[in-house]
Image (cartoon, rainbow, N blue to C red):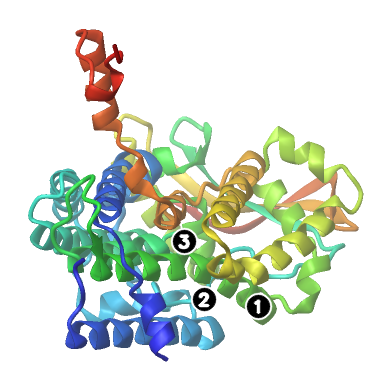
Amino acid sequence: METLSTRGRVARVAVTVAGVVLLLLGTLWGQDDDFPFGPFRMYSTAPDPNADAPDTRVEGVDATGRTVVLTEANSGLRRAEIEGQQRAYIDDPGRLRQVAIAYAEKSPEAAPLRTVRIVIRWEGIEHSRPTGTSRDEVIATWTAP
Amino acid sequence: MKKVVGWLTEPVPLGRVAAFRTLIYLFVAADLVIFTPWVRHHASTPGDLYKPLLVGRLLHLPIPTPLLVHGIFWSLLVVALAAATGRAPRLLGWTVFALYFEWMVIAMSYGKVDHDRVGLLVALAVLPTVGRARHGDPRRTEAGGWALRVTQIAVVCTYFLAAWAKLRFGGLDWVTSSVLARAIIRRGTDFADLIAGVPYLLILAQFGIVAFELASPVIFFLRPRWRNYAVAFFYSFHLVTFATITISFAPHLAAITAFLALEKVRPLVWARGFLGRNRGEVKGHERPVV
């Protein structure tokens, strides 16, 4: 059997304890920014059982007037990434120009985007179940000058 | 104390470490091209949208450029496949860890952090410390036992600490909230829509999720046979998650194999045996006794 030296054993115990302590600190006080020791906060919020649910999308209008939904495939940006920086886009809608640039880089053969907007579709929820009704709200728009 | 340290470094067969190592490095290659191919899209994302994580700022990691992103992609793919052979386990292992870690910093620095890969990152960080391990080697190793144990701990933390996070961010109301209904609206399948239609089923599921997450450390106290059932339950939980809201947690699924007796899975030996039999060769114990 391959046994560990005392030093090897102590080092491993120390690393284990340090790792677990960092994970605990991250869980109790950390944020996503502290990756990989941040809290495991996937689906950890508690939205009201009767509050409408936001379903966000990013869409653009190209030079031909066509409306295109921007996806990971055609813009290289994930929806959750747009949502993660949503506040910054609302405060400065000019940032959406970067999304138009990302789209042009990823889809060079497509017509350039003249307008980019973030739209939230509010889906109705009652008693923690979808009602099937919805309404759209535009929260940020950028149009090429 | 001595008992805890003994548990932490409980020896396992070297063959198990070899199999786990091959599986994890093959997964890294698959992750690059199949499971999280979107990371490569950041090559064309404007640098203004890059918001580096704390670790990226501390280490002064560069703003991703097409050269950096494609460079890491191709070198990581080649090194991970080389590491999967088990050769130069320390050199190739540390290189994979460093490259994959930077790959993850790039992935998570555009406004969304995923929580499905702490177990995989731990596995990548500890595998190089084991050194050489040959497939099928029955000799036992304490260094390998520790590597598998801390990966298992990271897997269980992913569940157990997720329950804590729910309490912190959602509070006790989480179990009766509309969190699953929201998830289904955003990314639900037809199967999920069916489930969402049943009154109170989603709320029941929320109670079940918290109960399962809080109970997950029990796996460390189970006998091997029941431990395997618990692992099967883990996988079935993720199967249902995938069938309803298309979230795969693939890196975590790879890390869960740290709980299994992987040394018994010998695809190359089986293939060789199968081909040998087809050629009419028979082993000693297969000869008729006359």
Q: Quadrant of the N terminus of chain B?
A: bottom left
For the residue marked with disc 1, what is the amino acid?
Phe
Total marks drawn?
A: 3
Looking at the picture, which amino acid does disc 3 mark? Asp
The amino acid at mark 2 is Pro
- The chain ID associated with circle 3 is B
Residues at marks 1 and 2 on the same chain: no
- The residue sitting at 63% across, 63% down in the picture is A43
Label 1 – label 3 distance at C-alpha: 16 Å
Q: Do labels 3 and 2 share a chain?
A: no
B131 over B136 or under it: above or below: below
Q: From the viewer's perspective, is A111 left or right of B181?
A: left
x, y percentage for residue A17?
Answer: 38, 86
Asked which quadrant contains residue B276, the reply is top left
**Sequence-first tag of 1 and 3:** 3
Q: Which mark is residue B169?
A: 1
Q: Do the residues bearing badges 3 and 2 touch, measured as CB atoms within 8 Å?
A: no
Residue B201 numbered tag:
none
* Residue A137 as seen in the image, left or right of residue B201: left
Look at the numbered discs 1 and 2 and tell me whether their residues touch, using CB distance below 8 Å.
Answer: yes
Q: Is mark 3 on a helix, strand or loop?
A: loop
- Distance in Å between CA atoms under marks 3 and 2: 11 Å
Disc 3 marks which residue?
A: B114
